[in-house]
């Protein structure tokens, strides 16, 4: 087993255990994996680490799912006595209701963005990279929303 495999197992076991307090990634690397940030990122890309975080969160939620019954029961009791915030939360959870506003984003060509960045005196490549990252994140979120 490689060091990378061991670190992945330790990382996942720690984060997925609901008894462990949450930590920033840099604290995890230093205190749990007992290695440096440089060594960690030689073995894992930030995207790899994000994926491990997401996977561990799923496992952590599954581990506490049975406890959620008690939370749901307490919330339901608050609703029955007329607690407006509890009623609002109840409908948000059960019916997927949200106060979130959806804003339409117009797709812009990279040529237009390049011209805009040049006109404003921005670093063009950095500006375009920021746009690409934001566009990717938006499409990822929209894809995840459609799956639910």
Image (cartoon, rainbow, N blue to C red):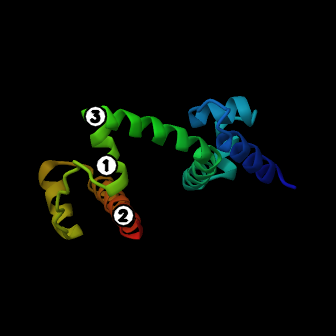
Q: Quadrant of the N terminus?
A: bottom right
Q: Which mark is residue 107?
A: none
Residue 28 position within the rendered picture, expressed as x and y whole percent measured from the top left: 65, 34
Q: Position of residue 99 (x, y in %)?
A: 22, 48
Q: CA distance from mark 1 to mark 2?
A: 16 Å
Quadrant location of residue 13? top right
Q: Secondary structure at mark 2?
A: helix
Residue lying furthest left in this view?
119
Question: Which residue is at the front of the view, 142 or 113?
Answer: 142
21 vs 106, nearest the viewer:
21
27 in relation to 97, above or below: above
Q: Which residue is mark 2?
A: 145
Answer with left or right where residue 90 lies relative to residue 29.
left
Q: Residue at x 57, y 55 (%)?
A: 51
Work out how far the residue at label 2 is from the one at label 3, CA to CA, in angstroms: 25 Å
Q: Residue at x 23, y 68 (%)?
A: 110
The residue indicated by pointer 3 is: 85
Foreground: disc 2 or disc 3: 3
Q: Count residues near mark 2 (Cα–Cα under 10 Å), then give few for <14, some for 14-19, many for 20+.
A: few
For disc 1, the neighbor class at 10 Å (few under 14, some 14 to 19, many from 20) is few
- Residue 73: percent from the left, percent from the top? 47, 40
Front of the two marks 1 and 2 = 1
Q: Which residue is mark 1?
A: 92
């Amino acid at each position: 087993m490689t060091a990378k495999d061991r670190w992945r197992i330790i990382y996942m076991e720690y984060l997925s255990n609901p008894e462990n307090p949450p930590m920033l990634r840099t604290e995890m690397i230093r205190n749990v994996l007992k290695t440096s940030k440089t060594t960690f990122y030689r073995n894992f890309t930030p995207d790899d680490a994000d994926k491990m975080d997401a996977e561990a969160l799923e496992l952590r939620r599954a581990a506490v799912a049975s406890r959620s019954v008690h939370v749901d029961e307490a919330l339901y009791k608050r609703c029955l006595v007329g607690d407006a915030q509890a009623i609002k939360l109840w409908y948000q959870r059960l019916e997927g209701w949200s106060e979130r506003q959806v804003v339409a984003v117009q797709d812009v060509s990279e040529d237009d963005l390049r011209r805009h960045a040049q006109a404003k005196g921005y670093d063009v490549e950095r500006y375009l990279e920021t746009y690409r990252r934001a566009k990717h994140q938006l499409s990822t979120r929209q894809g995840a929303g459609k799956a639910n």
